[in-house]
Image (cartoon, rainbow, N blue to C red):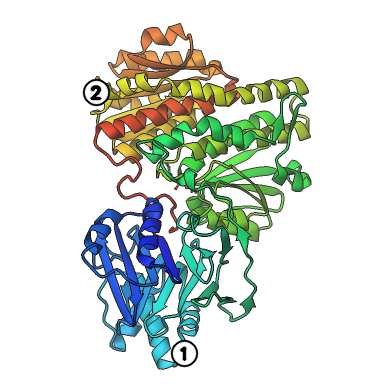
Amino acid sequence: MCGIVAYIGSREAYPILIKGLRRLEYRGYDSAGVALLNKGNLSVYKKEGKVAVLEDFAKNHDIAGNIGIGHTRWATHGVPCDRNAHPHLSNSHRLAIIHNGIIENYASLKAELETRGYVFESDTDTEVLLNLIEDIQKEEKRTIEEAVRVALNEVVGAYAIVVIDKNEPDKIIAARKGSPLVIGIGQNEFFVASDASPIIEYTNNVVYLNDEEFAVLNRNGQLDIKTLGNLEKTPYIQKLEMDLEKIEKGGYEHFMLKEIYEQPQVILDCMRGRMNAEQGWIKLGGVNEYATRINNAKRIIITACGTSWHSGLIGEYLIEELARVPVEVEYASEFRYRNPIVTQNDVVLAISQSGETADTLSAIQIAKERQALIYGICNVIGSSIAREAHAGSYTHAGPEIGVASTKAFTVQVTILTLMALQLAQSKGTISQSRLRTILYEMEQVPEKVKQTLKLDVKIKEIAAKYFEAKNFLYLGRGLAFPIALEGALKLKEISYIHAEGYPAAEMKHGPIALIDENMPVVFIATNKSAHEKIVSNIQEVKARKGKVIAIILEGDETIKGLADDYIEVPDTDELLSPLVAIVPLQLLSYHIALMRGCNVDQPRNLAKSVTVE
Ligand code: M6R
């Protein structure tokens, strides 16, 4: 939610900021802006809309300067418009700020500042924070870093901020609490960003600020980090392991398409070194580290949001089926607010691509306070959830830039499958021969996903038949039910078609009323154990003139004879079927969205990582 980027050094800041903003645009694209400090002048350019609009505007202005901050916004306080775009200036126009997060007590702070004569140009909480900093700086005669520190002690909420001061032009101040922030360290220069993508081509030495820490980045190359309580911290410099190529589109028209096509490789990468079918073992480092607690857990609670919650549902099926441990799957946003019963006998799995989702982070903080073991399944290395967890497994899918999650989902399911198997093996709830069979099948999954991707032309033809539909229903049973939910989410978020995922058997309890000749119903019929039942559900839809699009296993003549359209995917072990079945649904939503003229990588109103409640 909002991307921030900043630079101080001897290079021109503007090109670095703009390039960085383009990379961070997945985090929000309601408006974009930069502030540049040059020879005592502070210039701010900001525009509603995407980074390209800002670039177009800025090209006719003076963009010189070796210090700069930039922002791409996902609106929270105030509609998207130039006025509410960041950076914001303080009343005296001496300070400028960029902010990702929410200042919850902004209303009371604003009221107080107004009584002291402060005037606000925007509707944002950020402008309030900046004027609070200015007020402290003026009234208490403090340096900019001290004023930032004192102000942040007064605010409630989440933030990653960067502040520059026209009167102290040799430093920038960055701070974080609850929103991500990375500092890149170059030769007498520093970069700051919401993630490492704007930094990677300049340096791979980075420092991740911790919550309630702030950094002073000096032009002479000195980096000072302190806590908000004013304790000095020694910067912990880490090496970035990120590949520049991986954050480019690599010849694909969209990031989403590239990421769908990367799935065979990332599933393979995710399994690599973690299992061996021949020898019949699975080894998730995090599980080994806490083997006793995990093996003895009375219950596993999975908490996540959106697509990650859907993979959690698959995890529930797999863990209960294979390891016979009770599992509950909770929306993190509900879990955190309902005083959940969690004990030291529970293991809480937090699943998150970004590792920054605010609700999931809060949910695990609550569970941690109640002594549960927290296990993170994250994609972004060094992310907040990964760091907050006691143990975990990275999914190693590389950066996912498309707002609609695709490859992150399949690798989450891969980890959950391995985890269920490892647990089953430790608890003795699976025979060694069954375990080997599943592991052999897992090794085949990347190839089967590759074969499924070859169906793209047919999927595009099907998309062309249905792209004007107003509603879609997605139905599945057992392991195919979460796939129905995920297929529906993919369609609605990028094509803006209303789509519902439902357990196929539940259709007769309500949604069947929606079915007529205009309703496409996507059946996920890839689990053999539910075949007869799903055939009956298809008949029920056909009897009401609904249009059936079926995802079937190769050679399923029964459903071929019934469906209006079908997509045949390769057979695999039923427990692994979600990994293959989701692929045609990702492609179907991609093509439908394109045919409707939608921006598939940056759908309206959404942002890649939701760092607000
Ligand atoms: O980064 P996370 O996995 O925690 O994100 C959770 C959801 O915000 C995310 O999956 C969202 O639903 C995606 N846009 C779905 O494609």
74 to 439, vertically: above or below? below
Residue 536: % across, % down: 43, 14
Instruction: Report the label total.
Output: 2
On the rendered structure, is 522 left or right of 431?
A: left
Name the residue: 58% across, 42% down: 396
Q: Secondary structure at mark 1?
A: loop
The amino acid beneath tag 2 is: Asn
**Residue bearing mark 1:** 142
Residue 239: % across, % down: 61, 57
Q: Nearer the viewer, residue 242 or 490?
A: 242
The label on residue 518 is 2
The label nearer to you, 1 versus 2, is: 1
Quarter of the picture containing the N terminus is bottom left
The label on residue 264 is none
Q: Residues within 10 Å of mark 2 (few under 14, many from 20)?
A: some
Specify which label sits upstream in the sequence, 1 or 2.
1
The amino acid beneath tag 1 is: Arg
Residue 468: % across, % down: 23, 28
- Where residue 221 sits, quadrant-wise, is bottom right
Q: Is residue 542 visible?
A: yes
On the rendered structure, is 53 left or right of 494?
A: left
Q: Nearer the viewer, residue 245 or 546?
A: 245
Q: Nearer the viewer, residue 286 or 250?
A: 250
Q: Residues within 10 Å of mark 1 (few under 14, many from 20)?
A: some
Q: Secondary structure at mark 2?
A: loop
